[in-house]
Amino acid sequence: MQRYLLSRVIQSIMLMFGVLILVFFLVRLTGDPARIMMPRDASPADIEAFRDAMGFNEPLPAQFFHFMTGALQGDFGRSLHYRAPAMRIVLERMPATIELSLAALIFALIVAIPLGVIGGSRPGTIWDTVCRAVGLVGQTIPNFWLALMMISLFSVTLGWFPTFGRGGFSSIVLPAVALGLFPLGKFTRLVRSAVLEVRNEDYVRTAYSKGLLDHRVYTHHIFLNVSVTLVSIVGVQFGYLLGGSIYIETIFAWPGVGRMINEAVQARDFPLVQALAFVSAAFIVLLNLLTDLAYVLIDPRIRYED
Amino acid sequence: MIRRKKTHGHTPHPPRSEPILSVKDLSVRFNTVDGVVHAVNSISFDLYRGETLGVVGESGSGKSVSMLSLLRLIPEPPGEITSGSAILRSGDESVDLISLSWKQMNRVRGRRVGFVFQDPLSSLNPLISVGKQIREIIERHNIARGPAAKHRSVDLLKQVGISDAGNRYHSYPHEFSGGMRQRVMIAIAIACNPELVIADEPTTALDVTIQAQIIDLLMKLKREMGISVIWISHDLGVVAGIADRVMVMYGGTGVETGTAETVYRHPRHPYTVGLLGAIPKLHQDNKRLVNIKGNPPSVYSALRQCPFAPRCPWSFELCTQQRPPLFALDGNEVSDSGHTSACWYDLEHDTRRTEDVV
C-alpha cells in the first residue's frame, strides 16, 4: 500500500512539472507576450521597456530557467493589475473558492445519495421518476441562468438571501445551490444506476439469504459497493466545480479564484493567469490523489496491487 | 460419470418420517418485456429429515429458480410466485413459506434455512472481510453478540477446515482460493444451525479435486449437525454419490423422483432414460455420444402438455393433450416407496396409461 501511494505521489509531482512547462509556453505560444500583455494603445517605446522589464528579450532557455527557479520557490512574478506577488494573491483567494465548492459538493451529495438510492431500489415507481427527473434537470439547467433566477426570486422579491458577496451562512446558500446543481444531477443518476446494478449482484442475494433486514442490506452491502463508484466521480466533479465557479463567483461577486480567473484574463494579467493555472492544476492533481487514497481505504482489492 | 458410490453413507432406504419440507404445486413466472417466462410449472416434492435430495436437470429446467423462490430469493418483480405452498415443519410447528410476510421470511432465512451458492467469488461481498460476513448472520439471528459472535465466527472457520482461522477472520474474499471461499459460504450457511441447507450447484465453479473436498465437507457437516440438504446440480455423477433421493427436473417441473439407486438403475421417465443414456461411459467404445433429439420446450408458453412430449420416442396423443400427473410406481424391482414419474407411458409394463387411472 505504501508503495502504491508513493508511486502515485511521484506521478503527481512529475505531472506538476509538466503543468509548469505548459504554463510557461502557453504565454509565449501566442507570439509576442509583451504586445499581448500591454494595452492596445501602448506606444512602441512603452512596449519595449515592458519587454525589457519582464525579461522577454533574454534567450528562451534563460527565460525558462528563470521561470522554473522562481516557480519552484512559489514565485510567479508580480501581478500587473494588483502590483503584488501573483502567487500570494491567488492563495489569498483560494479559501473562498474551496469553501464554495465544498458547500456545493455537500449540498449535491446530501440530496443525491438518498434520492439515488430510493430511485434505484424502487425502479419504475414514482420515486424513481422523481429521481430520474432530478438527474435530468440538474444536468441540463445552465447554472448561471438558475443563479439569476434565484437571485430574482429569493433575494430581490423575497429578500431571504443577500444578492452577492461573502459573509455568513446565508450568503453561501444561493451560490452553493447554483454551483451544486450540475453535480447533484450527475450524482443522482450515478447513484441510481449503481444501486440498480449492485442490487442484482450475487452477494446481495447472499445477504438476503442470511435473513438480513433491508436497511442493513442497503447500508452494509449495496451502498458500500456503490460508494466505490461514487468516490471516483466525486473527485472529478470537485475539480469541475472550480471551473464552474468562474460564472457563479462572477454572478455572486464571490471573492474567490474563479472570479479572479475571469478578471485576470480580461486584464491580460499574465503572471496572475499563470499562477492561477498552476494552482488550479495543483488542486485537481491533489484531488485525484485523495480519490485514489479513498479507493484504497474502501476497496481492499486495491491495497496489494503492487 | 456415475461412479462416486462410496463413503457418504446414505441409507438405501431412508426412514420415512414426516417430511420437513413439503412443496405442493409451486409455480413461478417472470413477467419480462419479451413476455411471460414460465420458469416453474407446479412442482411438488417432499424432503425428509436428514436426507439429501439431489435435484438434477439441464440449464433452464427451473432447478435454481424453484428452490430460490421457496425463500423469495428471486427478484420480484419481474419474478412472481403464482401458486403453491411450501410447508416447513419443525416439531409440531409448521409454516407455509409461500404465505409468509417479508418480515417473517427474514427470520427463516439464514436461521432455519441456509444457502450455499454456485460461485463463491461473486456470492461474497468483495469489500467486507470474511469474518464479518460470517459474524453478520450470527448477530442478525441473536445467536451471539460482540466478542462471543466473533469467537463463534472463528470457530466456524475452523469447522469448515480453514487453518489459521483467527488471522483468516480478517481476510477478504479475494485473498482466498475458490475452494476456501466456498468453505466460507458453507460456514455462513451453517452458522445458525439450520434445519435445511439448499446448495445451488456448490461445486460447479470449482476444479475437480476441490469439488470432492467441498462435497465431503458438506456431507460431513450434514451428518454431524443432522441437516437436511437440497443439492442442486447438473452433474449426475456428483448427485449419484451423495443423494439419498433424486428429483429429475425438466421444463420447470419434477418429472421423476425416487431413491438415487432406483432412478439411476431403473429410470421410468423417458427423459431420465435419455439423460442417463447420454452419459459417456469409459468401458463402452461408442463412436458418438448419444443425445436427446430436439430442444427443451419454450418457456414463453404455459405448460399444457407433457414438456418432453415433442422429443419423446414413446409419446402418443394423450401426451400432447394433457399434462401427466405424478404416477406412483411401486411394484418395481427395488421395492422402495416414493418412486414417481410424470409420464403417460408405463415404461415398466410397456403400456400406455389412460386418463382413467388419474
Image (spheres, rainbow, N blue to C red):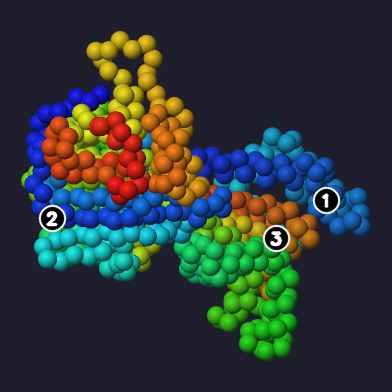
- Position of residue A286 measured from the top left corner of the image (x, y, whole percent): 51, 52
- Of circles 2 and 3, the one toward us is 2
Question: Which chain's residue wears label 1?
Answer: A
Relative to B59, say whether A41 is above or below.
Answer: below
Residue name at image x 23 percent, y 44 percent: B328
- The amino acid marked with disc number 3 is Ile
- Which image quarter is the N terminus of chain A in? top left
What secondary structure is found at the residue carrying circle 3?
helix
- The amino acid marked with disc number 2 is Glu
Q: CA distance from mark 2 to mark 3?
A: 81 Å
Q: CA distance from mark 1 to mark 3?
A: 17 Å
Label 1 sits on residue: A36
Question: Which chain's residue wears label 3?
Answer: A
- Of circles 1 and 3, the one toward us is 3
Q: Is residue B269 left or right of residue A231?
A: left
- Same chain for labels 2 and 3? Say yes or no: no
- Which image quarter is the C terminus of chain A in? top left
Residue name at image x 44 percent, y 27 percent: B293
Decide: few, some or many residues near mark 1? Use Cα within 10 Å; few <14, some 14-19, many ≥20.
Answer: some
Relative to A145, say whether B232 is above or below.
Answer: above
Q: Is residue B306 left or right of residue B107?
A: right
- Of circles 2 and 1, the one toward us is 2
Decide: few, some or many residues near mark 2? Use Cα within 10 Å; few <14, some 14-19, many ≥20.
Answer: some
- Position of residue B235 measured from the top left corner of the image (x, y, whole percent): 29, 32
What secondary structure is found at the residue carrying circle 1?
helix
Label 3 sits on residue: A261
Residue name at image x 83 percent, y 55 percent: A38
| Label 2–label 3 contact, CB within 8 A | no
Label 2 sits on residue: B18
What secondary structure is found at the residue carrying circle 2?
loop
* Marked residue nearer the N-terminal end (1 or 3): 1
